[in-house]
Image (spheres, rainbow, N blue to C red):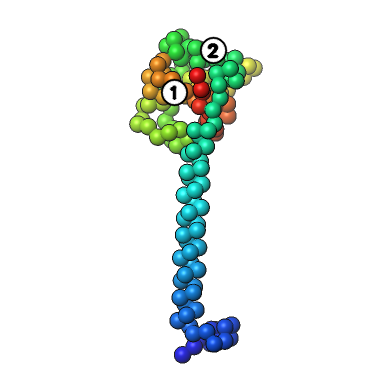
């Protein structure tokens, strides 16, 4: 027997058929949403590998910081070399303690400013360096 709502909106359509259509629409909508979410996640991680900056494109202060990192110091800030947690997952996933952060001097800043270089592995030798000029909001891989 047809429901009152089915008869009123879709004359001649059985309630079983209408229910099957509704299930198919919901399932396909859920699959579409899942696909979109996964594609955004992949895009976000892939965009990191495409965001590259050469040493020559870095500000002079960042170039000087990179030289200090490779020399093993001395560093101008007490917090230079501390572990960078990567809590937001903006950099490739690694074990805790893998990344270390170093301050890039910001002219006229009263504090450490927003600029940092993050080094992966052994900071002096790894060759894995990332630059941020907006306090960890975005990163660019430093290409040597």
Q: Is residue 111 visible?
A: no
Q: Compared with residue 106, is residue 134 higher up or lower down, i.e. above or below?
A: below
Q: Residue at x 48, y 64 (%)?
A: 28
In the orientation shown, which residue stands out farthest toward the left? 95
Assess whether mark 1 and mark 2 are in contact (beta carbons under 8 angstroms).
no
Mark 2, other Cα within 10 Å: few <14 / some 14–19 / many ≥20:
few
Q: Secondary structure at mark 2?
A: helix
Numbered badge on residue 128: 1
Numbered badge on residue 64: 2
Q: Residue at x 47, y 49 (%)?
A: 38
Q: Is residue 127 visible?
A: yes
Mark 1, other Cα within 10 Å: few <14 / some 14–19 / many ≥20:
some
Where is residue 31 drawn, in percent x and y?
A: 46, 59
Numbered badge on residue 26: none
Depth check: give the residue in front, 24 or 138: 24
Where is residue 47 drawn, in percent x and y?
A: 52, 37
């Amino acid at each position: 027997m047809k429901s009152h709502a089915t008869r009123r909106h879709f004359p001649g359509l059985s309630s079983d058929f209408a229910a099957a259509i509704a299930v198919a629409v919901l399932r396909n909508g859920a699959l579409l949403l899942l696909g979109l979410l996964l594609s955004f996640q992949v895009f976000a991680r892939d965009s990191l590998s495409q965001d590259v900056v050469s040493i020559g494109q870095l500000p002079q202060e960042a170039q000087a910081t990179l030289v200090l990192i490779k020399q093993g110091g001395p560093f101008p800030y007490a917090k230079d070399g501390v572990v960078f947690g990567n809590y937001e997952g903006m950099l490739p996933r690694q074990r805790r303690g893998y990344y270390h952060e170093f301050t890039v001097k910001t002219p006229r800043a009263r504090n450490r400013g927003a600029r940092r270089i993050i080094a992966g592995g052994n900071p002096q030798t790894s060759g894995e360096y990332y630059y941020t000029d907006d306090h960890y909001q975005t990163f660019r891989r430093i290409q040597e």
